[in-house]
Amino acid sequence: MNGMRARYCVSALGCLTGLLLASETLVAQDHWIDAYREPARRLIEESTSTRFAWERLAELGDTFGHRLSGSKSLEAAIQWAAEQMKKDGLENVRLEPVKVPHWVRGAESLELTSPGRHTLVMLGLGNSVGTPVAGIEAEVIVVRSFADLRGRATEAQGRIVLYNVPFTNYGETVQYRADGPSRAASVGAIAALVRSVGPPGLRTPHTGALRYAERSPQIPAAAISTEDADRLQRMQDRGTVVRVRLKMEAKFLPDADSFNVVGEVRGRELPDEVVVVGGHFDSWDVGTGSTDDGGGCVVTWEALRLMKKLSLRPRRTVRVVLWTNEENGLRGALAYRDRYRDELPNHVLMLESDSGVFRPNGFGFSGSDAGRLRINEIARLLAGIGADRIGASGEGADIGPSVQAGHIPALSLEVDGNYFLLHHTPADTVDKIDAADMARAAAAVAVMAYVVADMPERLK
Ligand SMILES: [Zn+2]
């Protein structure tokens, strides 16, 4: 633009005026973000021209299977991830010890015993106690809400309560899984069943953690498929007395050793200022945890691999953290906050991906208005891959404790996909994920992390 104007100068004075005008134009138009158009283009190009992220996620799931806290498969996968990070050329790759709860499912079953005998598809809820060896057999009372349970409290006594509450959104429906068992116990129920927290989907049960209240007896609890919940509802509505036998071997073993996996690209000017990206590496013990949250781990890790591959070293440090034990304890997130408590003021941004790695549409952001302005400017670099929308709030279970303790700006990757259809089910496997979408998700995280880590002024 400068050169074009100067080329038409016909006199020394005219030429000087032209140059001055041109430099003013340059100041007006050369926005800080312009310096990032080329690196962003390269990051997107590198990510979307291969299937690397998807292949890595497939290898993780195929090789190690599920990654429940306390399992050998999680620990083997953690060692593998650290080795792979070193091969990628990441710096300061380390395993940070975390003691995690060690819940094991054991054998389990649910049988309709009257009228007739039929096997029901079930998954015990994480953290549940088991049943006696012979199981628990009782009549089922189906309720549609906590209010419904309160109204029928005397009926629940000595029975198995089934919460048949259709999925609306996770935040709203998950309370029946988390708190339902203790609420049922508080009115005398001897076991609890929960309609799976997810949309209907081919008779697939969804596990997930329950949370026992301190004052209620601990009763065993399991999820059943939406189809079977509706079936038991219909039978109750017809006046049929339904009896089931629940058998669960679930129990806790002593806490186990685990680790958060950490790797970095050290900053070239301000290495002590850190942009953290990551997901949780543990999963439930069904499926391979590819959507929840192996994919989130791989796309955030990709941000660093892509920077190394392209020799892009930002001004500040970018750190990937694969947190352990999000699903049934959050111990990895808490350990990170405690280990880095003194350094939280140097955390510029924390970004989590834990909503799946389907087609990315942008990020949720929590932070100041000035920070939002910058994040919106950066997001425009992602318009070409459709990931330029910035939503009202950014959050994640694993970044949460540190974000709150350090008042750190937070981003979460947002995607268009049916996460809650797969979430915590045996169907959570890599084949549900599209390689091109995942590459775009990795590119979006890489551009966001790189620009925030490199931009001249710190994100406010
Ligand atoms: Zn998750």
Image: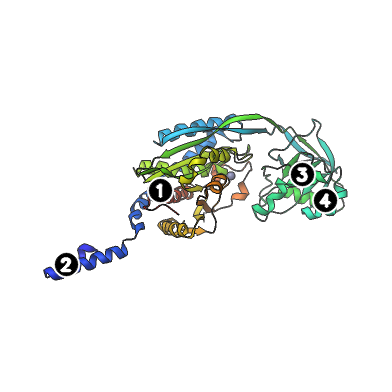
Which amino acid is tagged 3? Ser
Residue that label 3 marks: 182
Q: Is residue 97 left or right of residue 268?
A: right
- Mark 1 residue element: helix
Say left or right for 200 vs 333: right
Where's the N terminus, which quadrant?
A: bottom left
The residue wearing badge 1 is 453
Give the distance between the C-alpha atoms of the residues marked 4 and 3, in whole angstroms: 25 Å
| In this rendering, the label closer to the viewer, 4 or 2 | 2
Q: Is residue 301 above or below residue 394?
A: above
Measure the C-alpha gap from mark 4 to mark 1. 59 Å
- Say which of marks 3 and 1 sits in front: 1
- How far apart are labels 4 and 2 at the CA level? 90 Å
Q: Position of residue 171 (x, y in %)?
A: 65, 53
In primary-sequence order, the first of circles 3 and 2 is: 2
Q: Horizontal and vertical percent for residue 49?
A: 39, 47
Q: Earlier in the sequence, mark 4 or mark 3?
A: 3
Tell me the amino acid under the disc marked 4: Met
Numbered label attached to residue 235: 4
Colour setup of the view: rainbow
User: Mark 3 or mark 1, which has the lower sequence index?
Assistant: 3
- Which of discs 4 and 3 lies nearer the camera? The answer is 3
Within the displayed image, which quadrant is ligand 1 positioned in?
top right
Label 3 C-beta lies within 8 Å of the nearest ligand 1 atom: no
Q: Residue 45, how many percent across, how many down?
A: 38, 49
- SS category of the residue bearing label 4: helix
84 vs 381: above or below: above
